[in-house]
Amino acid sequence: MWKKLHSLAPLSTNLLHRGSASVPYPSATTADPFSSEITSKRSSLSQFSSLLLSPPQFQIEGNYCYSFHSPPSSRVFQTPRLHSGLHGLNSGFFCSIASSPAANSKCWNCNAVASSAVPFLVCHGCRSVQPPDPSIDYFQILGVEKKYDVKVENLEGKYKDWQKKLHPDLVHTKSKKERDFAAEQSARVTDAYRTLSDTLSRAVYLLKLEGLEVDEEGRISDPELLAEIMEIREAVEEAAETQALNHIQAQIWKKLEHWSKSFADAFQSRKYEEAISSIQRMTYYKRANEEIIKKL
């Protein structure tokens, strides 16, 4: 039986409390005619208590994580995979298994069960390329911790390793089905690398994993920022020498670094409104920098 819960721990406690209250333990003076019924109820309560205290197994389906206890017919709990705090989204618990890649996936070719230690892009048994799994995020694909402060140099090696395994030359003799999988996975690995290599896109992606969509085009009403951006653009247009452009670019990089740190602090503290504001400011400075690059 599926049941959606907003808070597992309090509900589990309440269920145990109600159960123990509704099934009194028999005393030594309990009448014989009722002893079998009471014993049966005590047995059921004991089994239910063991169920709540036993280590659960997990299954991911869509945006929810389902946990169930052995045996498979036992009660099942459902919790949101993502914790969110803005725009009217339901708040909930982080599902620990949600970050585990392809927990119950099987290879389409040999039915080997996916290892939880590595992304299931290529079967560890028959080496067949697998179809993309949306539950595997970009951080998992590139084998780095899911956080904002990522060392870009750690991404390139993993990116190249995956592309070697997914290269068209290695799958050209495979079926069209597997070649299509390889093309899709290769594109996803490339997108993962590009996304996580850039501070701005990485910030946007992290909030997306939290269930928050960021409008990078959102206007900022800060008059000081808008005036500063206008001055930068005018300075870029008037700059006639490379040295002047390099000087302006160095100032922009300092601004980007400042707001990048601001995002990191806000994200760490789960101050999502501040995090979004930092992203929007970074967007303004990044566009100004792109104007300089065009002119260099």
Image (spheres, grey):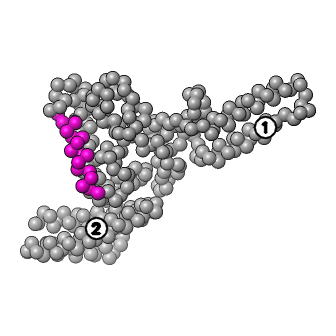
Q: Is residue 56 left or right of residue 250?
A: right
Tell whether position 222 is magenta.
no
Locate residue 218: give its quadrant. Answer: bottom left
Residue at x 21%, y 67% (from the top left corner):
288
In the image, farthest residue toward the front:
28
Q: Is residue 261 above or below residue 156?
A: below
Residue 285 visible from this viewpoint: yes
Q: On the picture, is 47 further left or further right than 115?
A: right
In the image: residue 273, left or right of residue 4: left
Whether residues under marks 1 and 2 lie with C-beta atoms below 8 angstroms apart, the answer is: no
Q: Name the quadrant of the N terminus.
A: top right
What percent of the width, then of the height, locates residue 6? 58, 46
N-terminal-most mark, 1 or 2: 1
Which residue is located at x 89 percent, y 33 percent?
28
Classify mark 2: helix, strand or loop: helix
Q: CA distance from mark 1 to mark 2?
A: 62 Å
Q: Nearer the viewer, mark 1 or mark 2?
A: 1
**Residue type marked 1:** Ser
Q: Secondary structure at mark 1?
A: helix
- Region of the chain picked out in magenta, as a range: 151-168
Residue under label 2, please give it.
Answer: 256
Quadrant of the drawing holding the C terminus: bottom left
Q: Residues within 10 Å of mark 2 (few under 14, many from 20)?
A: many
Using the image, tell me which numbered label, if any, was put on residue 22.
1
Question: Picture coordinates of residue 276 (x, y %)?
Answer: 38, 61
Q: Residue at x 41, y 65 (%)?
A: 265
Q: Nearer the viewer, residue 241 or 69?
A: 69
Q: Position of residue 165 (x, y in %)?
A: 22, 36
- Amino acid at dot 2: Leu
Label 1 crowding class (10 Å Cα cut-off): few <14, some 14-19, many 20+? few
